[in-house]
Amino acid sequence: MNNPVLYVLRRLSSRIYLTFVTVFLILPVMAQATAYYTHSAQADIASLRVRYLEQDNLTRPYLVLLNGVVDGTDARNTLEVSFDCMTHDIKQYTYTVLHLNADWSPSDLQTTEYLQGFTTADITAYELSNLTQRDYTHYSFTFPNADMQLTRSGNYVLHIYEDGARSKTVADVCFSVAEPLVGISAQVRSNTSKEINGRYQQFDIDLDMKHLSAFNANEITLVVQQNNRTDNAVVVRQPTYVEAQRLRYMNCDELIFEGGNEFRHFDTYSVYYAGYNVNRIRFERPDYHAFLEADENRGVISGITDKTGSPYIQQNDADGQWLANAEQSDYDDTDAEYMWVHFFLPVNEPFFDGSLYVGGDLFDNQMTIVNRMEYDNEQRCYYLSALLKQGGYDYQYLFVPKGGKQATLLRTEGSHWQTENTYTIAVYYRPVGGRYDRLVGYRLIRSGQ
């Protein structure tokens, strides 16, 4: 096949069918999962987003419990949740909030123990898309609000469902509520127990415990996440040093992360002009198609594990996040088109020892059939076609070894100690006899700054 454009377009119809069938097949599995995670659960739900009601759109949000309640009266401490349903038919959506443990499984608390007000609420705010090739309806709501307030710290999930039936899951949105009792000091260094100034970043963390009443070190759980990923999240239950009012986590092998590389980026703000990293825009009724530039494999040389990959180049990124953006519009939520975005990663031979995924918030930081790439033997490249809303997106190529669950960036992106990453540090406290994990400390740290 000499024309990759025609090749992709011809195969697109079969991939659409595969994506829709697969999503419906995995729904029963999701329903049985013991741990919640942020994701869209129906094939016609797209662009799931959670952000602060009034703050920087690219700040990863969490809530703070002050004076025993978080009630939504402060826009800077309130979440806005939104998503699109790919039709103009108005749906009846309802949500409820569940309290979760540190591992995102349901806690033992009853609803009345963490929630004031009603236990469910309907989503009544919606807008129809405006003159777009694909019809969609944009739904949104804020939380907490006048009808529902939270009284406990910890992890939560907003469970969104259709027609009043909780089994008809539309989406789950996970978030955290912290009570600021533990001070967190952290240092990210390149001098790790694996190597010096190479591929890794290692954390040394100090916890100031003076505002937490009597505790034992084994009642504290430390969780660290990188760029909102869940596959490589680290859980540490024992500190290195225990002092009277301080816990120290020093030289812990568990707290070593691949530095990775800066995220790749593309911008589809226009349906007429090729934006950043877009090779061309093409209209094939009924949709627009954005063909990205063929990406460079920035990973290590095959079979060599002591190299970091391509030389590190510093550049600004949003660590995996995205924003809707439509040219000459002040209403991106309803004016933005949905476009088929085509990713290409040239590789001489397929990886027989694992699978390749496009990762980032654009796919809820999950690795499923929806964002798994396929290999084209004729064009010698991996490719993926995904229906995405117009805007600016960060992404990376993640390699998952066969039988593994944790992705690595070494194969496709390289890894560098200088890379700027956003880390989330969460401190949970469950005393002996406690029935839930209190989130007593929470901090976002950006390495390399």
Image (cartoon, grey):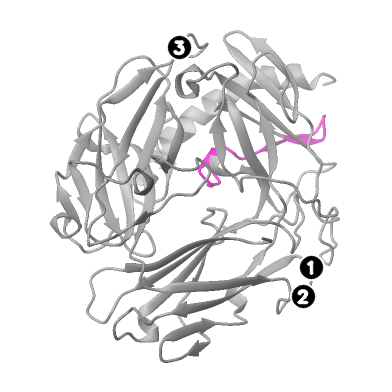
Instruction: Give the mark nearer the N terminus: 2 vs 3.
Output: 3
Quadrant in the rendering for residue 251: bottom right
Residue 424: x and y in percent read 51, 61
Image: 66 above or below 147: below
The 10 Å Cα crowd at callout 3, few under 14, some 14 to 19, many 20 or more, is some
Secondary structure mostly seen in magenta is loop
Q: What residue is rendered at 37% in x and 14% in y?
A: 88
In the picture, measured across the screen, residue 186 lies left or right of residue 142, that is: right
Number of marks drawn = 3
Which amino acid type corresponds to the residue marked 1 in the rendered image? Gly
The 10 Å Cα crowd at callout 1, few under 14, some 14 to 19, many 20 or more, is some
Residue 448: x and y in percent read 69, 61
Residue 19: x and y in percent read 52, 30
Residues drawn in magenta: 362-382
Which amino acid type corresponds to the residue marked 2 in the rendered image? Glu
Q: What residue is rendered at 64% in x and 42% in y?
A: 395
Image: 292 above or below 54: above
Mark 1 falls on what kind of element?
A: loop
Mark 2 falls on what kind of element?
A: loop
Does residue 370 appear in this view? no
In the rendered image, which residue does mark 3 sit on? 130
Number of the front mark, 1 or 3: 3
Give me the C-alpha separation between circle 1 and circle 2: 6 Å
The 10 Å Cα crowd at callout 2, few under 14, some 14 to 19, many 20 or more, is few
Mark 3 falls on what kind of element?
A: loop
For residue 195, the mark is 2
Residue 296: x and y in percent read 81, 41
In the rendered image, which residue does mark 1 sit on? 198
Quadrant in the rendering for residue 171: top left
Evaluate if marks 1 and 2 touch, with contact meaning CB atoms under 8 Å apart. yes
Q: What residue is rendered at 35% in x and 86% in y?
A: 216
